[in-house]
Image: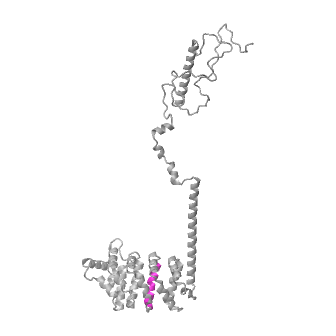
Amino acid sequence: MMSTMQHDPSLLRGFLMQQEGDDKDTAGLLRTMIETLLAESESGLQEQMCDVLRMLLDAESLQPSNKERSEFWDVFYQKYFWRVIGVLTEDSCPNTLVLVLDLLCFCVHVHSMWIKYFIMRNKMVDRVAKLMYRKEKVVVLAALRLLRTCLGLKDDFYNTQIINHNAFAPLVDVFLANGERYNMLNSAVLELFEFLKKENLKPLIKYSVEKFWENRLSTIAYSSSFKQLKQMHEQNVNNENVRAEGDKTVMAELKISRMRRRRDGSMDKEEESYFESDDDEAAMAPSDQMMMDPNPHPQPFPSPRVAGSVIFNSASLPPLPSLGGGSPWEPLVDYDDDDDMDVSSSHQHQHQQRAAEEEEDGKERKNGKKNDDGDGRLYTSTPLAASETPTNAGEDAPSAQAGEKPPSNEPPSS
């Protein structure tokens, strides 16, 4: 079997999977190997079975492209892992415990994701912690080695399991019982706490200081590791307090700034985007648009109009008195035309002029006879007095006819 494993582990693995698939009730070779490992038989045979299982479970010997890895691991963990964990009791054989703990160290290191569920389900951390009360130092060191492997992964899952099961309590008890003797157990425990301090694993440091510092770790004077661990815990607590105060200050400033913005009447981004959107313009009714723009499309009108869209008919209106000699239809204030005057404004001005001329013609017809010499000028049949002025404001007086003396500009004598 060892020769086959060294040549090609996939051959033996395929044979084991075929046995598991053919008849599940019959004990296969894999079950026999695990029972041989757990039985209190010859130590040499147990060690060989442990090596064979390691090579079968090694991820490097499995082909990732095939389903061989997942299928074999599923069979081992679902059907046989609880048997391996069941050996971790206080009355088991020390040699068997050491081999099983070494196999579990290998599985934790290689199958970091697959083994987590079965560790939590079978309470493996609690079982391993209780093994530290065994008298055999080799078992205590094997259990300590498994805890150190879990810590070396720096995984929150294992840290939580250690804290929840209070796994450091047996460790500290064994360390204090060992005293100041410089041996492998003393060095292993000091190295574990040095690792916590070096990696600054905050949950475990807090757990160790708050749980075991008073009257226990504080009494150790020959090593400064625990005092430094306590100082690091205090520093972590101060940093957390400063960070918490900073977060509160930031939140308070944000709240105050929001209140100030509300008092000033300013708006946030959502409100600004709502009011700046073109939805209101798109939803505006055509009648509203006409009210805002009295003449969106300039069109010629059949009759003259004045003052926006109100249309006047000169024939139906009574004559208006002229102000200052000008046309009655002229505006009181002369505004300069804009450069961008549209065509409708010019049409409006022409219609106003035409209406004014018609009103003047109507007046002239009432006062006298109208004579037109072709240049648009008006003459009356009766001569004008010296003090009278022409009726058309803004136009020059008609030139005097031949043989007539033009009126004098001097005032009449009294």
Looking at this view, is 108 or 122 the one in front? 122
The C terminus appears in which quarter of the rendering?
top right
Answer left or right for 149 relative to 385: left
Please say if 355 is above or below 33. above
Please say if 156 is above or below 341. below
In this view, the residue farthest toward the top is 403
Looking at this view, is 34 or 134 the one in front? 134
Residue sitting at x 59%, y 23%:
328
Residue sitting at x 55%, y 32%:
341
Please say if 225 is above or below 260. below
Residue 181 screen position, x and y as percent: 52, 92
Answer left or right for 188 relative to 3: right
Task: Report the span colored magenta.
Answer: 137-152
Residue 376 screen position, x and y as percent: 58, 16
Whether 260 is among the magenta residues is no
Residue 106 screen position, x and y as percent: 40, 81
Q: Is residue 189 visible?
A: yes
Answer left or right for 119 relative to 301: left
Q: Main secondary structure of the magenta part?
A: helix
Residue sitting at x 61%, y 19%:
392
Q: Is residue 59 visible?
A: no
The N terminus appears in which quarter of the rendering?
bottom left
